[in-house]
Amino acid sequence: WVTRHFAEYLAKKGKRIVGWDEIAGDPLLRKDAVVMNWRGGTYAVDAARAGHDVVVCCHSPCYLDYPQRLENDPYEYIAFGGWLTAEAAYQYDPYRNFPPELRHRVLGGQGNVWTEITADQKELEWKTYTRLAVLAEVLNCHTELPRDWQAFRPTLEKRIAALKAKGVNMAPTGPLRKAEIVFPGGRKVKWGGGVCPILASKLTRNANGIEVKIDTALK
């Protein structure tokens, strides 16, 4: 009711509401409401089929506060959704699951940064701008998948160098670590890919209070 109320209120002022994709579950919501798709899957497509415009910002790879899996990362992260490397972000398909007749509903994309444990501007820059540069490339160029990371990487390195010259605290694209995640009871899982689907964190903390150890020395 609250969402519908403010959607009508804003419409009377010539505006339209923008909300996370949970709002699309309301069949009585105005069709001019814009849906921010963070959950991925078919939520964005379902919203488009219902008549809504969509901004794609799926948590992976659009949540730029996820750990970068760098070997020498000086900052802490809470990995709600696992690792997100620059290379993994480069393989993002903003039109995933969208049939051609619904692609006009995609207004664009967005990178998000949640700052619960980000201490200052320099840390924010480190966590954000390298992968944001990757997402900018993906969202503007729409090249076919799978994309050639090694061909794109020299271009990205030039952008990183240019921003570093302006004083921005840019994260590198590597080297990356292979991690062993140890859960209570001794169960171990090794991850070497770009995105880790396990709820875990760097150091020994996560959002659910589960103790997690990451062995950075594992090769």
Image (cartoon, rainbow, N blue to C red):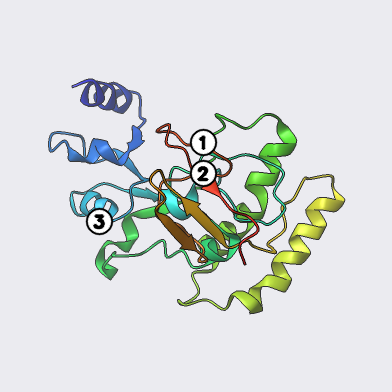
Disc 2: which residue: 201
Q: Label for residue 42?
A: 3
> Residue 36, position in %: x, y?
36, 43
Q: Residue beneath label 1, please?
A: 205
CB atoms at circles 3 and 1 under 8 Å apart? no
Name the secondary structure under disc 1: loop
Residue in view at x 34 percent, y 49 percent: 54
Reply above or below: 155 against 11. Answer: below
Callout 3 secondary element: loop
Mark 3 vs 1, N-terminal side? 3
Q: What residue type is disc 3 on?
A: Thr
> Residue 97 in the image: x percent, y percent?
28, 65
Q: Are marks 3 and 2 in contact (CB under 8 Å)?
A: no
Q: Residue at x 27, y 27 (%)?
A: 7
Residues tagged 2 and 1 counted as in contact (Cβ below 8 A) = yes
In the displayed structure, does residue 201 sit left or right of residue 134? left
Going from N to C along the chain, the mark reached first, 3 or 2, is: 3
* Location of the C terminus (image quadrant): bottom right
Hey, what amino acid is under mark 2?
Answer: Ser
